Image (cartoon, rainbow, N blue to C red):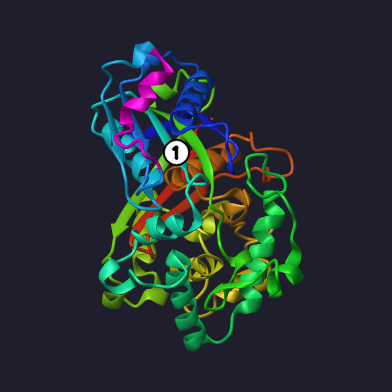
Amino acid sequence: MTASIVGWAHTPFGKLEAETIESLVVRVATDAMADAGIAPGDVDEIVLGHFNAGFSAQDFTASLVLQASPELRFKPALRVENACATGSAAVHQAIKTIRAGAAKIVLVVGVEQMTRTPGPEIGRNLLRASYLPEDGDTPAGFAGVFGKIAEQYFQRYGDQSDALAMIAAKNHKNGVANPFAQMRKDLGFDYCRSEGDKNPFVAGPLKRTDCSLVSDGAAALVLTDAETAKSMRRAISIRATAHAQDFLPMSKRNIIDFEGCSVAWGRALQSAGITLSDLSFVETHDCFTIAELIEYEAMGLTPKGQGARAIKEGWTQIGGKLPVNASGGLKAKGHPIGATGVSMHVMSAMQLAGEAPQGMQLASPKLAGIFNMGGAAVANYVSILEPTR
């Protein structure tokens, strides 16, 4: 049984001082149901994606969605978490429920509020998504983990600083047209490539412009079964999904191969009955620019060690053969952990429905690929989306 996205909502990402976890959840839940044209009483189940890990004093947050309407009281609600892939874990959980025939309409919400947390504590919270016995003392926190990945990649394939700067510049340029993005500024290649007071090295070869933004925000989706979707004003079908979980310790893997990413992409493409070249665009997990570079290779866009070709030859630019992160990605849009995967599905659904913001909308996209990653290629989620009308 196929699931379809029939409604969505998205807050701006950034430092949202006037908001709370509760207000963000209520806002997008209410707006997504209105966008889908359903009443709260029509919802069969609720899934909340919320990483937390110390960012919010309020834990046990699944029931906060019920604050959106008294009609949601007593609806089944659960919270899921899988590090930075928490949002996609929530979406995939809803899809499984619909495919199992246990629900016709599921409301999915992803949320995080990070900016109220002091900087050192942010680093400690994020580092909990790594294997602490090996990486718990890593300088610069989770950025330090990806700094080590970048160093290993550079040692194997040579200095890729130009390619990383080009990825950062691409995503910041794309983010200008996204009204939900935290940073809507075209920084340009020269700024992203140069080290300086405003763009210092953070970890290994990674500079500030190589790192995604600490952010607050929320996004929501309404998913239905295929029959219910027929009565909706528009529907985006989930053609295929895949989830591949890998070992947590990097020492047990060849970390610069992102093998779990490759497995998830392979499973999803096979399930959808397509190849990568059939996709119109991809939203991928650029928590750090080195991640996007390796993901080019892991998804099969280039052979191993040649990911730089995809950015240097313009393949992943808007207008290229496979645009990647037309939304600006995590790099420009921001990365409120629990909301990120839901946001990626919202951005892709908007593109396929022809409802993306002006300047961001691609020309007649037919198939979308989404890759959302938790930890250092540990939790790997892929979704393939297509419009049904």
- Tell me which residue sits at (64%, 71%) in the image: 200
- Quarter of the picture holding the C terminus: top right
Q: Amino acid at mark 1?
A: Val
Magenta segment: 56-69
Q: Position of residue 227 (x, y in %)?
A: 37, 23
Q: Quadrant of residue 250?
A: bottom left
Count the numbered circles shown.
Answer: 1
Q: Is residue 153 above or below residue 361?
A: below
Q: Position of residue 331 (x, y in %)?
A: 59, 57
Q: Position of residue 18 (x, y in %)?
A: 57, 31
- Tell me which residue sits at (52%, 23%) in the image: 31
- Tell me which residue sits at (44%, 60%) in the image: 123
Residue 374 seen in render: no
- Tell me which residue sits at (37%, 41%) in the image: 50
- Quarter of the picture holding the N terminus: top left
Instruction: Name the side, left or right, on which 169 lies relative to 144.
Output: right
User: How busy is the neighbourhood of tag 1: few (under 14 within 10 Å), some, or many (20 plus)?
Assistant: many
Q: Quadrant of residue 68?
A: top left
Q: Magenta stretch containing residue 243, yes or no?
A: no
Q: Position of residue 179 (x, y in %)?
A: 67, 39
In this rendered view, identify the residue nearer to me: 312 or 365: 312
Q: Which residue is mark 1?
A: 111
In this rendered view, identify the residue nearer to me: 193 or 260: 193
Q: Is residue 115 above or below residue 29?
A: below
| SS for dot 1 | strand
In this rendered view, identify the residue nearer to me: 196 or 348: 196
Q: Magenta stretch containing residue 64, yes or no?
A: yes
Residue 379 seen in render: yes
